[in-house]
Image: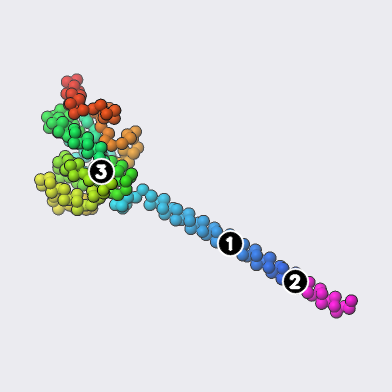
Amino acid sequence: MSEKNRDGKRTARQRLAMEREKQKSAEKRRRALIVGASVVCVLGLAAVIGVIAANAGKDDGGDTAGPVVAPSGAQGEDSLVIPAGRAGAGPTLTIWEDFRCPACKNFEQRYRSTIHELTEGGQLKVEYRLATIIDGGMGGSGSRRAANAAACAQDAGKFTPYHDVLYDSQPPETDDVFGRNDKLIELAGKVDGLDTPAFRRCVEDGTHDSWVEKSNETFRNSDHTGTPTVLLDGRNIYRDGSLTPARLKQMVQDANKG
């Protein structure tokens, strides 16, 4: 073989080797781009998940972040209790309620007249504590909006009658009509002297929303399992289902004798 032919074959092999090196380099770059893109996708997905997690648990009423403004006359730790009855009256009945809760409505309808009789007679003090568990379970904002409106009624000294109107007007559990401020203001018209500009502003501004959330947080952190939870001087008297209006009256009378 001539020297010229040998040089030609070496040159061809060199060109082939160089081409293969170029292909290897290109493949490495392609793989690096794929890996980089994959990392970006994972980071993007993580960002989306983070946004979803940050918004989880928010109801249709929006963020309730803000200063905790307790209603006028609220008592107890963190001012989360709305009292009814004379201060210093006999035993204390604590009622945890949710204005969207059908079982709470049943309790109110059955025991309301007895509770009013005992509080008006100076034999019983009632502590109302508000929760929003139906909002959490069914969605919506009716529990919170109604609780805020009830706190606004407390500011006006009209909590008890407005509380009773809300339960008398309670919609089906799945209907979030109490999430509408105009409906809550309309119901205030059933309570003498409540539908005022101050009450309307309080409802529309959600003045006590953060207070309601604080109250519900306290309920969630307790050992109570549902609403209504009814305690007489700290003892659960409603959980076993044996309570009756007559028995409640007798228990209160016995406590006053003791």
Taking the image as shown, residue 138 lies to the left or right of residue 109, namely right
Which residue is labeled 2 in the image? 16
Q: Amino acid at mark 1?
A: Ile
Residue nearest the viewer, comparing 108 with 59: 108
Please tell me whether residue 231 is drawn above or below residue 63 in the rendered image: above
Give the residue displayed 17% in from the left and 20% down from the top: 257
Query: Where is residue 145 drawn, in percent x and y?
Result: 25, 48
Which of the 4 image quadrants contains residue 28?
A: bottom right
The mark found on residue 100 in the picture is: 3
Which residue is labeled 1 in the image? 34
Q: Over which residues does the magenta segment extend?
A: 1-16
Please identify the dominant SS of the magenta region: helix
Provide the secondary structure element on which disc 1 rests: helix
Tag nearer the camera, 3 or 1: 3
Q: Amino acid at mark 2?
A: Leu
Q: Between disc 2 and disc 3, whose residue precedes?
A: 2
Q: Is residue 89 visible?
A: no
Point out the residue furthest to the right here: 1
Query: Where is residue 152 drawn, in percent x and y?
Result: 19, 46
Give the residue displayed 44% in from the left and 56% down from the top: 48
Point out the residue furthest to the top here: 258
Q: Quadrant of the N terminus?
A: bottom right
Provide the secondary structure element on which disc 2 rests: helix
Tag nearer the camera, 2 or 3: 3
Q: Between disc 3 and disc 1, whose residue precedes?
A: 1
Taking the image as shown, residue 231 lies to the left or right of residue 49, namely left
Question: Callout 2: few (<14), some (14-19), or many (20+) C-alpha neighbours within 10 Å?
Answer: few
